[in-house]
Amino acid sequence: MDSDEEERIPYSLRKEWSDVTPLPQDDGPDPVVSIAYKDEFRETMDYFRAVYHSDERSARSLDLTSDAIELNPGNYTVWHFRRLVLEAVGADLHDEMDFVEHIAENNSKNYQIWHHRRWLAEKLGAEAMRRELKFTQKILALDAKNYHAWSHRQWVLQVLGGWEDELEYCQQLLEDDVYNNSAWNQRYFVITRSPLLGGLQALRESEVRYAADAIITNPENESPWRYLRGLYKGDNNSLVSNPEVSIVCVDVIKKNPIKKNPYCVFALSLLLDLLCYGFQPSDEFRRIVESLRNSDSGPSDYKLASTVCAILESVDPMRSNYWSWRKSNLPTLAC
Amino acid sequence: MECGNSSMKKRLSITQQEQMRVEQKVFEIFKILDGVSPHTRSLMLEIWRDKHIEFLTRGLRELAPSYSVLDANRPWLCYWILHSLALLGVSIDSEFENNVVDFLGRCQDANGGYGGGPGQLPHLATTYAAVNSLITMGSERALSSINRDKMHKFLVQRKDSSGAFRMHDAGEIDVRACYTAISVASVLNILDSELVQGVGNYIISCQTYEGGIAGEPGSEAHGGYTFCGLATMILINEAHRLDLPGLIDWVAFRQGVECGFQGRTNKLVDGCYSFWQGDVLALVQRLSSIVHEQLKLAHVREAQNPAKACYVETHNSTKGDSDPCGSSHQAGELSDIGLSFLEGQAEWGPLLNSIALQQYILLCSQVLEGGFKDKPGKYRDFYHTCYCLSGLSVCQYSWSKEVNGSAPLPGAVLGPYSNLLEPIHPLFNVVLDQYYKAREFFSRSW
Ligand SMILES: [Zn+2]
């Protein structure tokens, strides 16, 4: 920082800026939340205010916005003005991509850079697709859950295309970290929206198997449970009638005796949903659930759903209020 | 023998490693609480009011150079600080209040809305922060400084053809923009059908397969957007269009073994979600008739249509009707929802573990030198101070059936009863008394 400061020549001493009068911030006589700006910050912003005010859309204004953005990439007014200048001077938008990538190195969670990036990609059109997918991939390699990067990537896929390798990309990320819920979300996005795959109906069976495998390997991982449930969003009848779903629940419960392992919460929770949507449990099914009851779970109930709630209340104390609420709101027809 | 074992062992993923590290730190803190005397325990769980007030009031005056990165968020700094102080029962002196009103006046654009600082482009998020700050201060001068006529025009301009809102001129569209626009319009009593049109469609397109709400259609369910989306839907009287049981389930599962909330599935706990997620569960406590309807329908083979019932609990509002100046009724009715929402009764207790959440906030987020933070190992800031305190207030009143009922029982407040904070309006996140004052003011003139 110090060496930077030494090299930097103040705007007030630069010949090319001598015709501009800096415009100080109008903070009033008694400012509040008053930031003790460093000289460089204050001066840069004073010159920015001057060109913004006079609406000077020039090459030097572009350079000035670069400086201002380096100092505070969260200033949306500067970014907004920069776009106006870029258009006015007919700047090379590929250079602009480089600039955004440079700023993103330290600020990948800032709304403005991603909005700017979207604007750029929109202008460049289809040719930007590969670069955008690569760029988001680079950011996601550093932080696989970066919310903005995922949003941008989804936008690119929908507007510019590039779906071909997306499922494989999700697959790779899930192999790296099967707990990465953002990758599961992206998988759902691809399954439901990719124009190349045939849609959710066509893929549901294989996706159920994919989620079920992930569940059996790591039953304590909530992501595939939500994914499995989500494959039947808005279609509870199919959820109830696919035996594979209830089999997953039973398998997990059988393999993870509840007293040693509270991971069954997800299995019991899905089971409860099944029962609420009209699932008819077999005798074996009832027996397995009943076997989980202990003295804390209260008396055996004629409703299996009610028993499930009672078990959940005792094995999942963080959510005991929630389970007792579920118990008191069971559909009358639930088994 | 180690070699054989380690090759058998499953390699922990990044998510698991990070989670384990945080759990360890949190449990270490909780372990200290276990063995101590009741007196020490009470001391450990105390809100360090004086320290917080000192940290906040200093920040309201001046901030270190490092705050330059928030130079486009100064109305937010005002709101985070003023609201935190208000929650602690502190109001600033009138001279200083005038300085804040004057400063925010300089952020107000000639054509309506507020920017991040004097002369900056007006932006929906900073507009929300400025309006909530002025309401939190609550003087005639503060409330009358808002140009509502221009504000309405500004909000209309921010509307996209889809019905959703853009943050600023040619800015990004997301659920946060929708919430801040609708919240501001509602609390200022300028909400009308023009502003509402299409917003509900956008929000429901953002509810994900997990149950929570994302920032944009297709993105991942997220605590901040879930609050924004649900609050918006309530304010425009369309909450019944969301899958509420699914939403409640997702939020309930976000409270983890650390006792605090995470923002997304398999992410780390963070104090600010005490409000974003916790308040969602407080909001649904007052949507019981809609939720019941949806739960009943769940069993009916293939719900043909979402529940029809859409009114919040009360229809016999008395406060909203008295309008001596005869306001424009068109605008009035939609803006009344924020008020009538408060008149409903909570039919259930909290669906979160309120005591556990208070424990996380007080022991893991509270900084003894003043302020609150995300989690152990992080630094305090005004944002987390605001949302940890807001979450704490939500917890303390989570057993209260009525918003204006008697004070919470001691059992609802973790730590000494002097920890009790001011209650908030759960849709706008301003202190309740100040909300009523503003409501009264803005229904008088339009
Ligand atoms: Zn946070």
Image (cartoon, coloured by chain):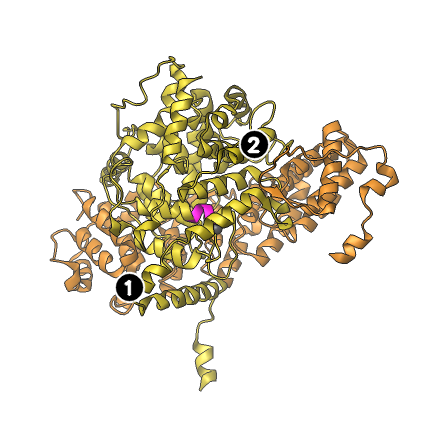
Q: Is residue B144 left or right of residue A59?
A: left
Q: Residue furthest bottom?
A: B1
Q: Which residue is mark 1?
A: B38
Q: Colour of chain A?
A: orange
Dot 2 amino acid type = Leu
Image quadrant occupied by the C terminus of chain B: top left
Q: Chain letter of disc 1?
A: B
Dot 1 amino acid type = Pro
Q: Colour of chain B?
A: yellow
Q: Quadrant of residue A268?
A: bottom left
**Closer to us: mark 1 or mark 2?**
1
Image spot of residue B68 (x, y percent): 64, 46
Q: Which residue is mark 2?
A: B104
Segment colored magenta: B384-388
Image quadrant occupied by the N terminus of chain B: bottom left
Vertical comparison of B63 with B432: above or below: below
Residue A231 in sight:
no
Q: Is residue A303 left or right of residue B31?
A: left
